[in-house]
Image (tube, rainbow, N blue to C red):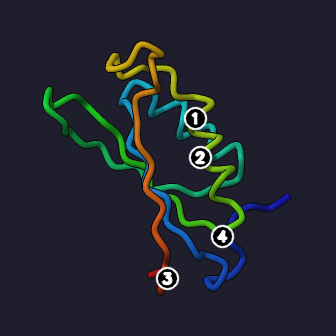
Amino acid sequence: MTRVASNLDAVQRLVFAVIHHDDADTAGQALVEAGYRATRIDAQGGFFRRGNTVFMVGVGTEQVDDVIATLRSVSTHTSGQSETGSAYGIVFVVPVDAFDRL
């Protein structure tokens, strides 16, 4: 199954995923293997200025849950801020009003 949008109208959501930099290579590979195109940006943030990586993935509405599940499956680092050891990372999903390739 092809997951990469075949036309520009198919991109309806932009997924911003901020994950621990140690999970970035695995996450990028997992997205590619699942058929998604992603832009990777290395960043620092938070109180301790830890290394983060931001992935931007443009997908159709029906693909958002799969992108999040793909990233969650490879996110092994924990925040250490909860007793359950919740995964380190956060995801934002925003609607896309316009999209074009240059």
Task: Name the element at disc 4.
Answer: loop
Point out the tag, 4 or 3, that comes first from the N-terminus: 4
Q: Secondary structure at mark 1?
A: helix
Q: Earlier in the sequence, mark 4 or mark 1?
A: 4
Q: Are marks 2 and 1 in contact (CB under 8 Å)?
A: yes
Instruction: Find residue 49 and report its horizontal and vertical position in percent.
Output: 15, 31
Residue carrying label 2: 68
The residue beneath circle 4 is 60
* Residue 12 at x, y percent in the picture: 58, 76
Q: At 41% across and 20% down in the image, what residue appears?
A: 78
Q: Is residue 98 above or below residue 2?
A: below
- Which amino acid type is shown beneath numbered disc 1? Arg
Closest to the observer: 28 or 98? 98
| Residue position for label 1 | 72
Residues at marks 4 and 3 touching, judged by CB atoms closer than 8 Å: no
Residue toward you, 18 or 7: 18
**Rendered image: mark on residue 90:** none
Residue 13, quarter of the rendered image:
bottom right
- Give the numbered dot on residue 99: 3
Residue 94 drawn at (x, y percent): 45, 68
Q: CA distance from mark 4 to mark 1?
A: 19 Å
Badge 4: few (under 14), some or many (20 or more) residues near its Cα, within 10 Å?
some
The three-letter amino acid code for the residue at tag 2 is Ile
Of labels 2 and 3, the one closer to you? 2
